[in-house]
Image (spheres, coloured by chain):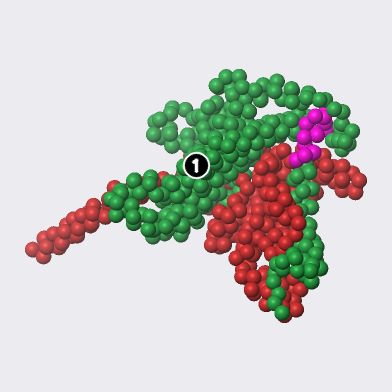
Amino acid sequence: MSQSTAARARGGERMNFIEHLARWITWPRFIFALVMLFFLTSILFPFYWMVSSSFKTYAEIGGRTAVYVPGALRWDAYRELFDPNFGARFWNFGVNIVNSVKVAVPTALIAMILSVLGAYAVARLQFRGKSLMLNGILAIYLFPGILLIIPLFAMLAQIGAKLGFDVQDNLPVLILTYLAQTLPVALYMLANYFRTIPTEIEQAGLIDGCTRLDVIWRITLPLSVPALISVGIYTFMIAWNEFLYALVFLNSRNMFTMPIQINTIFNDPSPRPHVVMAASTIMSVPILMLFLGMERYLAEGLAAGGVKG
Amino acid sequence: MTTSLHPPRRASRWRSLDAREARLAWLLILPTALIVFGLVLFPAVFSIWISFRDVGLGNLHDVFHAPSVGLGNYASVFRDFAFKFQNLGNMGAAVNSIVYSFAATILTVVVGLIAALLLNRPFRGRGLSRALFLFPYVTPIVSVAFVWRWILDPRPSGVLNDILMRLHLIDAPNAYLATRGLALLIVIIFEAWRYFPFAMLMILARLQAIDKTLYEAAEVDGAHTWMKFRAVTIPELRYVLGAIFLLRLIWTFNKFDDIFLLTGGGFGTNVLPVLTYQFSFKSFDFGKGAAAAMILLVILIVFLVVYAMTVMKNVDET
């Protein structure tokens, strides 16, 4: 008897649960869940596939069927990228990581400094030709990178021949072109932020005998930390991800940034997708971590300036 | 004594301070201006000049003495089979660029709108979902393009082939990115997948700024969800949708990386930026490359003018 009551109780619970579910699921909720599921799967599956493929062996990659979960956490692909004794040709990937850092960090730092100065002038000071200059700077949105690269190459080759530097395999030249691409957006993002700071605070500083540069350094900048962070990350991401200019301006393998080296590995005559996926994981993880950590600063900046791309 | 940040010009005793401020402003903005004008605006003008010259690898370092070829480069581009329209299966880079940009931009805005509407309603895990939705947009293009290629891999170990074969929808593995027509469709879907978060962010920001009383008023009038969407949401979003469409159209039209990495411009997916690259850095005919880039820019400007004259006018009138 006690058994049957227990069974009835369980049955009742189940009925309740199903009833509960039936009451909870309305058509709008059902459609919402379905669409949400579709979005999350199609967004996350490629990322799962990238990371899981990087842990597969060459046999798992080239088999007769796809391997959905790697048999074990195999580091073969990563060893091909870093271990000179593993017998692979691409063991030098560490150099490419260093090159990417060497390009992205200076781009971000210089862009932050220059855009702070420029944005302050735009937001707070009056000068003739301001709107003309702003429109000129905005026009960069219109020009395709591919249109600029031919004249840029010819022009820098001329200047380089005069001043004695090489255009190709020259990381500072690459940094300069990235600055040209990122400064306009950085300047707009910062200028918009500076305008939200009440002028009274700066006036107080000026009355106390600070110079303009003092005011920028002691008052404006400390109040603009969120905008500065988002400009820094935005410019870092552009330089870290950039493909076309690096493809044209870099020629020798030990100067390649990560995107170009990954492109080289992909186009190798013997396809090694697990190595490509391992290198892609190495390139993407820092960016995604940075993004998740700083998301609250970034989302606004992404919407306001728009990563040109 | 009161100080104003922007003292009126007429007050003579402020004139010297005014001038000093203007000089400081120029000093502050000069580095940015030099870099942007020197590395963007000047090259843009310079490329017009190059497009009328015969520039190859041999005289790239002495480009100012390159011989003029008149309209030769342009004629050569227009005659090129990779450029001109032949038939619907082989549209050439010019028509392809237009089809691809419009289709990809429309799809991006529609998917972005759906995503924004999803995330606009409160539910548990909304913050995390929004962050995840942005992943395709912030990940380096090389990574995502090669993941897509690996998913679409023509070998049986390619996961799409594997799934479709397990479901008995296909008998043998397909090379999706090497099939005319299908390749173009996949590239368009890829664009929407990668860039919808941009549209989503901007639409979401606008949605959250809509006055709630508008919806309440519509409810009082007896409007259903769909009617509220049509009568309140869409009109409120019109400006932002128009702006996103324009921006994404320009950027998609100018985009090189995505198609270059996915198909290399083959199998009916060639577009003007990739064609420009091929002329310049595969056959090293920089003059012809510059001419292709100028044609790209002219088409873009025509779009902008037409857009400004029709769409903007309609928006103003209604």
Which residues are the magenta region? Answer: B44-57
Asked whether the viewer can see residue B151, the reply is: no
Q: Secondary structure at mark 1?
A: helix
Residue at horizontal 81 percent and vertical 25 percent from the top: B70
Residue at horizontal 75 percent and vertical 65 percent from the top: B10
- From the image, state the color of chain B: green
Chain seen in red: A
Compared to A87, does B262 lie above or below?
Answer: above
Residue indicated by mark 1: B317
Residue at horizontal 59 percent and vertical 24 percent from the top: B91
What residue type is disc 1 on?
Answer: Glu
Where is residue B164 shown, x and y percent of the image?
43, 34
- Residue A169 located within the stretch drawn in magenta: no
In the image, B313 versus B194, the foreground residue is B313
| Total numbered labels | 1
Where is residue A146 shown, x and y percent of the image?
70, 39
Compared to B201, does B49 lie above or below?
Answer: above
